[in-house]
Amino acid sequence: VDVKLLVDGEERETLTLSAANHWKGEFEELYKYDPIDGHEIQYTVKEVAVEGYTSAVSGTAQTGFTITNTITGKVSVPVTKKWIGKEADSATVHLYADGTDTGKSATLNAANQWQYTFANLEQYKDGKAINYTIKEDSIAGYETKVTGDMKGYIVTNTNTEKLTIPVEKKWIGKEAAQVDVKLLVDGEEKETLTLNAANQWKGEFKNLYKYDQTDGHEIQYTVKEVAVEGYTSAVSGTAQTGFTITNTKNPVPPTTPKTGDNSNLSLYIGVAVVALAILGFVIVKRFKSSK
């Protein structure tokens, strides 16, 4: 840096300070009194401006001067809100500087596209870069995770809402001993529930996330019954209201004669011949009587 010596307010000499001279130097052999009129000369110093720094001078010509340069700069800290699962109405984030609440906050919502930038922030304090971080007010039913850095923070909220799905078994006809019911999560079998008379043919699938914890889509829950021989199964209801599985006993099919049985065929033919003979006899007898 270059330091100017001012003699009664006028620049007269320049001193260059650097790491090589340990940032120290001297203006030497200076008259204390003006050689012409004898007044005591006022010596001061000023620094040639250094970009990105502010300069402060302390001390006197008698004790020496100290010039302190403080680094300056402004930063902006953008924040983006992401949701996994159903969105809440809004979220409030707070700005911290080196772990201390700055008192600055922002409300994120759909109107501002869940984004905000904390702008025009001091970059340094006492010559040290400030570390800005973000914290969010907790939201019931959501887990919060903050990722990123001062170049851009992402606050991700995951919906943790859970469901309990009741299942009831009904019978039309004689009951079987028990049934197994499968829970399908987005079409894939995941859990099994056994229903029987001991649990009154009722049960529940519990502690189920309503929304996928990875991509946030609403999970589709359905059920199906492991087939019970001799019964037809029908499922009604929804994951929200519960499912009812109704089993109907299949009717016993009627017994039919075997078409390939020759003995039965001969019997049928014989019966038909006898019936025709009797019918012919009755007709002839009536004919003779009429004469």
Image (spheres, helix red, strand yellow):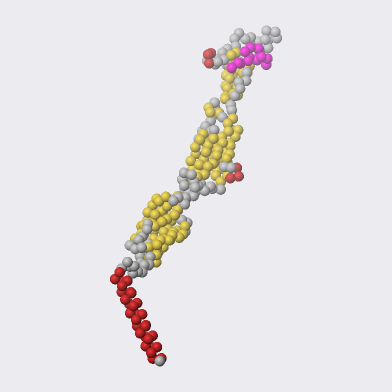
Instruction: Tell me which corner region of the image, top left, top right, bottom left or bottom right, holds residue 13.
Output: top right
Q: Residue 126's x, y, as percent?
A: 54, 27
For the view shown, which residue lies furthest in the left direction?
263
- Tell me if 107 is positioned left or right of 7 in this view: left
- Which residue is more in the foreground, 42 or 126? 126
Pick whichever, 240 or 15, lies toward us: 240
In the rendered view, does 26 fall on the left or right side of 227? right
Above or below, 102 relative to 110: above
- Say which residue appears at 60% left-offset and 11% top-offset: 27
Q: Position of residue 45 (x, y in %)?
A: 62, 17
Residue at (49% x, 39% y) in the render: 146
| Residue at (59, 23) in percent of width and height | 53
Q: Is residue 48 left or right of residue 205?
A: right
Q: Nearer the viewer, residue 151 or 51?
A: 151
Picture quarter containing residue 48? top right
Quadrant of the frame with the C terminus: bottom left
Quadrant (top left/top right/bottom left/bottom right) for the N terminus: top right
Foreground pick, 115 / 177: 177
Considering every residue shown, the one lying at the far right of the view is 37
Q: What residue sits 46% from the left and 56% below the top?
A: 239
Residue 119 covered by magenta stretch: no
Locate residue 268: give its quadrant: bottom left
Image: magenta residue range: 1-14
Q: Is residue 67 visible to the viewer in this orientation of the structure?
A: yes
Give the overall secondary structure of the magenta segment: strand
Does any portion of residue 198 appear in the rendered image? no
Q: Where does residue 2 sit, x and y in percent of width and height?
A: 60, 16
- Residue 1 lies, with reference to residue 199, above or below; the image says above
Residue 5: percent from left, percent from top? 63, 14
Give the number of marks.
0
Q: Residue 4 lies in magenta, yes or no?
A: yes
Placement of 42 over or under 267, stated as above or below: above
